[in-house]
Every structure is written in structure tokens, then in C-alpha cells.
Amino acid sequence: MEFRHKSVLLDESIDALQIKPDGIYVDGTLGGGGHSFEICSRLSEHGRLIGIDQDAAAIEAATRRLSKFQDRVTIVRSNYCEMRQVLGRLGITSVDGVILDLGVSSYQLDTAERGFTYREDAPLDMRMDQRQPLTAKDIVNEYSEMELYRIIRDYGEDRFAKNIARHIVNARKEKALETTGELIHVIKAAIPMKVRATGGHPAKRTFQAIRIELNRELEVLDESLEDMVDLLNDRGRICVITFHSLEDRIVKSRFRNMEDPCTCPKEFPVCVCGKKPKGRVVTKKPIVPSEAELEENSRAKSSKLRVFERIR
């Protein structure tokens, strides 16, 4: 299956990057190369783009898509949390912009055997990097009831988390849960019928929770943002597109803390903690998709773009 992924908030994020023709830019979530293609189109022969992705299918698709720019593109299979090391190996110490488009690509959702979707029966996988040994099946069958409850509550924000965790543990006593279909059947049984009739897909939140836990999505984001800002040149920008409130909260909080890192009590007349701002938040409110984009791409619905500018 061809790697398809319609880039969300494409014009808005490219505009926000304020691309310099001779600059160096990093796409930390390369995907099918949609954002990278637009960045490369604005670069001169002296400009450079480094694309990073942990998914082999994305690497292959983006390599094809960006082939006309191959003289200015370097593609690396890695996780964006290793951006500093990746750039170091390429002899790059600072960049003019970084873009992250978080979440699951359309290709990953539409390729049933990857196990991300609750629309078809497939093996419980959900790995963004298929070199990783741990899968969704391991989490579902080996996590304790308390651990399952915690991730479904915290990462899925599901009010029936406790009941779903209990049902999973009881079901796996009979036999291991191996497919998305088996897990969906268990989740449905844990949610009251009248709620199932009115809400979205009953498994949506649990699947999100397992995927986030498996791929350490929130920890990676939280631990990497400041390091990526530190890589930016003066007036360089980082654009982050999120798809759920947990990611957005991390980005909003990290950006705000980097703009105003002072930890002194409010009553102090002057700052004595010595913590200096790293730049400014460009987007006081997140940028969201236009009506036209939502009509064209329903998966853009929950997306938000936040932008931070480095000031040295």
C-alpha cells in the first residue's frame, strides 16, 4: 500500500517557519514528506533539509517524494528525540527551523496490519518503529490491571477506564488477546450500551492510550522540546502540530516556560533565579484548521499548531 498522508495545517506551518532560502531545516516527523516538500521548494541550492522518521514505510515514501531535491535533502531513520545526535553526525550544530507533525499518519491508520485502527481486525501491533520488540499485544496481555487503568485513564481520558481494565484482565485469563477485533469486543462489553449508542467508537480512547504508552509519545515530546529549541539559531522557529489535548498541553506549557522561565516568587522586585528566556511564543492561541481544510480532510479536526521563536 502506498504511503498516503495529507499534511495538516500545511500552509499555516510553512508560513510560520519563515523559511530562509539558504537555511537549514529539520522535519522531525517526516511521514510522507508533505511538509518537507514545501520546505524544499523554498530552499536554494545552498539550503538544506534533514528529514527524520522512525517508520520504514515513511522513509521509503518520503525518499521517493523528495527525490527531485536530493541534493539538499538528508533522510535519517530515527526518532526526533535523537535530533541533536543525528545532526551532530552530519556536522550540524544549529538550524533555522524545526517542524513536528505528531500523531498517527493516514497510512498507518489505513494499513490494517499495523494494528493502529479499530475499524478492521488485525494483529495488536501499533509500533511506529517496527524495530522495537514491544507491541500493543504485550501491553494488553502483560500490564497489571492497575497499569492498564492508569494508561486508559491518563492517555485515553476514558471515564470507563477502570471497567475496561478489569474486562481486559478477565478476558485474558481465558486466552491471550491477540487481535484488534478481540480487544474491541472486550472494550465494548465494558461500556454501557446507551453510551456506546451516542459516543464515537467505543475503542477509540483505549487504542489511543495503548499507542501513546507503547511509543512513549508524551515522554518523548516532553523531554525533547527544550533541546530542539536550543538547536535553533537566533530567530529560528519550531512549529508543532498536535492532535489531542495531552500533546497540546505539553507544548503550550513548555513554550510558556521557555518564554518566562523565572521561578522567583511574584513579590520579588527583581529576578534572582538567573533563568533567562529562550525566546517568545508566537502563537498566544493555537492555529486551527480552516473550514475549507476540515471539509477536505476530516482527520485535521482536532489539530492545533503552536509556534515558538528562539531569541538569542
Image (cartoon, rainbow, N blue to C red):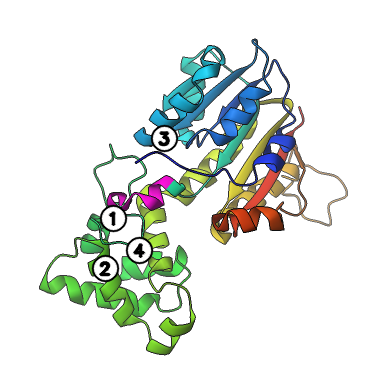
The amino acid pointed to by label 4 is Tyr
Q: Secondary structure at mark 4?
A: loop
Residue indicated by mark 3: 58
Q: Nearer the viewer, mark 3 or mark 1?
A: 3
Which quarter of the picture shows residue 273? top right
Q: Whole-Å distance between the Cαs marked 3 and 1?
A: 20 Å
Which mark identifies residue 136?
Answer: 1
Label 2 environment density (alpha carbons within 10 Å; few <14, some 14–19, many ≥20): many
2 vs 3, front mark: 3
Determine which residue is flagged by label 4.
118
Tell me which residue sits at (27%, 62%) in the image.
180
Give the amino acid at mark 1.
Ala
Secondary structure character of the magenta stretch overall: helix
In three-dimensional space, the C-alpha distance between marks 1 and 2, rounded to whole angstroms, equals 11 Å
Q: Are marks 1 and 2 in contact (CB under 8 Å)?
A: no
Does any portion of residue 78 appear in the rendered image?
no
- Label ID, residue 183: 2
| Residue 224 location (% of width, % of height) | 53, 39
Q: Where residue 170 sits: x, y (%)?
A: 20, 77
Residue closer to the observer: 133 or 180? 180
Q: CA distance from mark 4 to mark 3?
A: 21 Å
Question: Disc 2 or 3, which lies upstream in sequence?
Answer: 3
